[in-house]
Amino acid sequence: MVQSINHQRRLWLATLSGGALGLLGCAQPQPGAGPDPALVSALAPTGSLRVGVYPGSPTSLVRDARSGQVAGLAYELGLSLAQKLGVLAKVLEFPRVAEVVEALKLGQVDFTVTNASAARAQWLDFSSHLVELELGLLVPEASSVRSMAEADRPEFRIGVTAGSSSLLSLPQKLKQPRVVPVLSLEQAQQMLSSGTLDAFATNKGILFEMARALPGFRVLTDDWGTEGLAMAIPKGRTAGLAYLNQFAEAVRSDGSLQSMLARSGLRGVKS
């Protein structure tokens, strides 16, 4: 069931208690003895695991336009963690990553997957890294820019998502372009199509997803850095952090992380 709710911002709530939603189906509690109640209380204090996602990123949430199937690392890992904890998963959908992070800071979301930046570590606790992603640029095919060095010029307008880690880190790498904050990936696509932006910068997982929806655009082959994706929980829930790291190690070693990466279509992973 998907219904809209108002809580300082517009959210979409998907309560996974039966039936199928996306690729994992329902996130029903596992029968039998589960984790220590104190652990469950730390990671899911409301009795369900509230999973924060934003659309358009394989690291968070993507929908197949034809089949309607749902994938994405934050989405699938959230459902899997809820199942292991023996609680229901509630998927809260936000327009952009900054709003997911803000909801985590306020304790309105319990879990997501995002860039484990030093700035976010002030407010969030992170698991060990799941994957390293290259940061890149999406440009029109007709653009004369073929490398990051060629993009470092004053007249070049590069969009970044407002509140994202790229907004802070890109000007440290490319000194001259005009950095333009945009409210969502959807708005970025519109601005690229209209020529209001010359390029868009973020991790290549998102850029390749955008390129699929924007014929005539390409992702530059080089990069301007990397970001480490990790599972994130609100600061102060220390009792759950060790378990989160165990969970991270388990999904890496048993192959389930690789399966999730394949389903999400994530590209741009640093080799």
Image: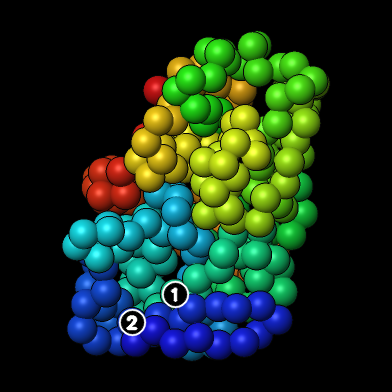
Is residue 188 visible to us here?
yes
The 10 Å Cα crowd at callout 1, few under 14, some 14 to 19, many 20 or more, is: many
Q: Tell me the quadrant of the picture where the N terminus can be found.
A: bottom left
Q: Position of residue 243 (x, y in %)?
A: 48, 62
The x and y percentages for residue 121 are 71, 51
Q: Is residue 240 visible?
A: no
Residue 238 sits in quarter: bottom right
Q: Is residue 225 above or below residue 16?
A: above
Determine whether the residue tagged by mark 1 lies in a helix, strand or loop. strand
| Kind of residue at disc 1 | Val
Amino acid type of disc 2?
Answer: Leu
Q: Residue under circle 1? A: 91
Residue at left offset 60%, top offset 25%: 225
Q: Is residue 265 left or right of residue 219?
A: left
Q: Secondary structure at mark 2?
A: strand
In the picture, the disc for residue 16 is: 2
- Marks 2/1 in contact by CB < 8 Å: the verdict is yes
Residue shown at 58%/53% (left/top)? 187
